[in-house]
Amino acid sequence: MAPRRPRLGRRSRPASSAGPELRWPEGCLAAAAVSFDLDAEAAVLAFAPQAAGRLGVMTHQAYGPRTGLPRLLRLLAERRLKATFFVPGYTAERWPDAVRAIRDGGHEIGHHGYLHEPLADDPRVEERYLLRGLAALDAVAGVRPKGYRPPLWE
């Protein structure tokens, strides 16, 4: 027997929940968070600095800020959607116009490390990564992110 599907338009809450019933604005029944990582070259260079001299690899990694991001920003604008873009500090320094286009489109910019490096076992090293990424985002786009998505899902 197939599982029952919830009926749209029916508002309910779990029996264990406390407090008032959730009311979505304008009759909406759900919400979604839309986010992207603009890693660009940072994701490769963190592990293979020698790749900086490999045109094929660097061109591949540049596709996001050079081609994909402008298309995505147009699509989001057409649909009047806002998103969060997690940006490594290195990417902000390398692609400042791309990061400013995100900001100017009214999207949130989140912190995503500096060089998309794995978190360190030493808290002092980890702090340097965090501060360097924050400084780059501030210098390039004048933002101090509230959100943080660690590189490599750590």
Image (tube, rainbow, N blue to C red):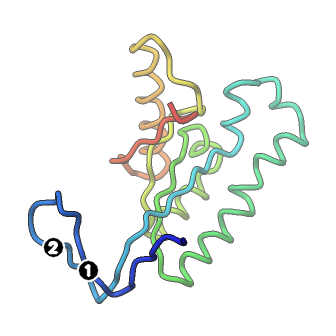
Which mark is first along the chain, 2 or 1?
1
**Which residue is the site of mark 1?**
11
What kind of element bears circle 1? loop
Task: Report which quarter residue 78 is drawn in.
Answer: bottom right
Which residue type carries mark 1? Arg
Q: Residue 95 got which mark?
A: none
Q: Residues within 10 Å of mark 2 (few under 14, many from 20)?
A: few
**Which residue is the site of mark 2?**
21
Q: What residue is shown at x 46% (from left), y 30% (from top)? A: 132
Is the residue 49 above or below the residue 92 in the image?
A: above
Q: Position of residue 145 (x, y in %)?
A: 37, 47
What kind of element bears circle 2? loop
The front one of 135 and 72 is 72
Asked whether the residues under the numbered discs 1 and 2 touch, taking CB atoms below 8 Å apart as contact, a structural biologist would say: yes
Q: Position of residue 21 (x, y in %)?
A: 15, 73
Is the residue 14 above or below the residue 57 in the image?
A: below
> Which quadrant holds the N terminus?
bottom right
Q: What residue is shown at x 59% (from left), y 51% (from top)? A: 96
